[in-house]
Amino acid sequence: MAEQLNIQLYKKAVQSIPGGVNSPVRAFNAVRGEPLFVDNASGAYLYDADGNKYIDYIQSWGANILGHAHPLVVNAIQKAAVKGTNYGLSTVLESELAELIKKAFPSVELLRMVNSGTEAVMSAVRLARGYTERDKIIKFQGCYHGHSDCLLAKAGSGLTTFGISDSAGVPDSMTSNTLIVPYNNLDAVKAVVQKYGDDIACVLVEPIAANMGVIPPAEGFLEGLRQICDSIDAILIFDEVITGFRIALGGAQEKYDVKADLTTLGKVIGGGLPVGAFGGRREIMEYLAPGGPVYQAGTLSGNPIVASAGIAVLKYLFEENPYNKIDRLAEVLEDKLRNAFKNIAGDTSINRVGSMFTIFFCKGPVTDYLSAKNSDTSEYALFFTAMRNSGILFPPSQFEASFLSTAHTTDDIETTVRALVNWDRNE
Ligand code: HOZ
């Protein structure tokens, strides 16, 4: 039998790219497979190099809320590209995108565009430290905020998937000011604050954790963080790279009615192109160069093609407000999966907030990093592989979120559930 093209492409990739992938979460080691090489994608579907079709619940790790290659986004990109791919100078598109973001996030008075979520959070933390003239930051176990040095400590996403929650190459001096506490545990935050109160520049949190699988904030958790920050004059940073424009137009802040001082964004606001942004209270943001002493820069920041794609997506979201519809579809999927799992041996627990969810292979409830880590990752691998073989693509890790898009349909849900019902565990 001829070797699959996908395998051939992987063998070629490892000759020039470490692990054959440009980001570890794309490796399928955790589910005991080879990376999937994509040929093209449209709406809810993705086609691999061998022509296999998948219902895609990765959706570029949540970036594609309108599904793949939405015509509005593709047109915006094409129109922008013929006018030049980057100028390294200002365009009106940057202010247009900024206005749309500000309209959705009342806590954001000024914002700056960058090129990734990593950059957004790295810059926001530097700004918080510069503004407060303090060094320490509070971060939560299992939350992932990109791969800048001071945040690679007990981090989720690929670090949890591959069991390297503290990366090599990061000197202790880079993380010595990073104070780590369990998610959803206000008492632990208070204890740290009692010890280090006046040295804490910021509390950095994913308001809905989505990088150790999806974990919603416990009742009062975000409000408690707000109060604690106010009591010590620390900056509250919400990392809404995943949740911004995903959970609601105004992200988790809108859903839970808690305002951050600084917010980081990415994914959805770039329509699937490389993007990040951070913004917040005017008096803090004015600490940035050129007006202020905190330096931050980027040749490609505010890129006209990225901004055009982002504007197209955000305008669509404002006009159509598809959140009820997409969340309802996700709820139907959750209910049907839950029912189907009742007839399958082993424990599962599904966490869902809006259109993002995780099926944990453990009894649950999953409320923090430790309970997420209770999951049986071998079972997840079996599930993942069975689904992949049936044309359903979930993330290749127990500790990542699955996402619906506006392109998914009830037929896709039915097909997904049927694949689960037909899962033959003995195969
Ligand atoms: N935030 C993304 C998923 N947790 C990361 C994607 C990546 O690392 O490639």
Image (cartoon, rainbow, N blue to C red):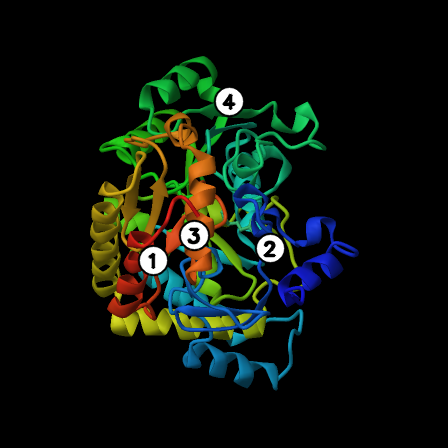
Left or right: where does residue 102 sit relative to residue 165?
left
Q: Residue furthest right?
A: 15
Question: Residue 116: in sight, yes or no?
Answer: yes
Amino acid at dot 4:
Asp
For the residue pair 145 and 284, the one nearer the viewer reads as 145
Amino acid at dot 3:
Ala
Residue 419 — which label? 1
Separation (CA) of disc 4 from disc 3: 50 Å
Residue 199 — which label? 4
Residue identifier under label 3: 386
Separation (CA) of disc 4 from disc 2: 44 Å
Mark closer to the observer (1, 4): 1
User: Which callout, 4 or 3, points at the residue further toward the start of the chain?
Assistant: 4
Left or right: where does residue 261 sit relative to residue 21?
left
User: Which callout, 2 or 1, points at the residue further toward the start of the chain?
Assistant: 2
Residue identifier under label 2: 35
Amino acid at dot 2:
Pro
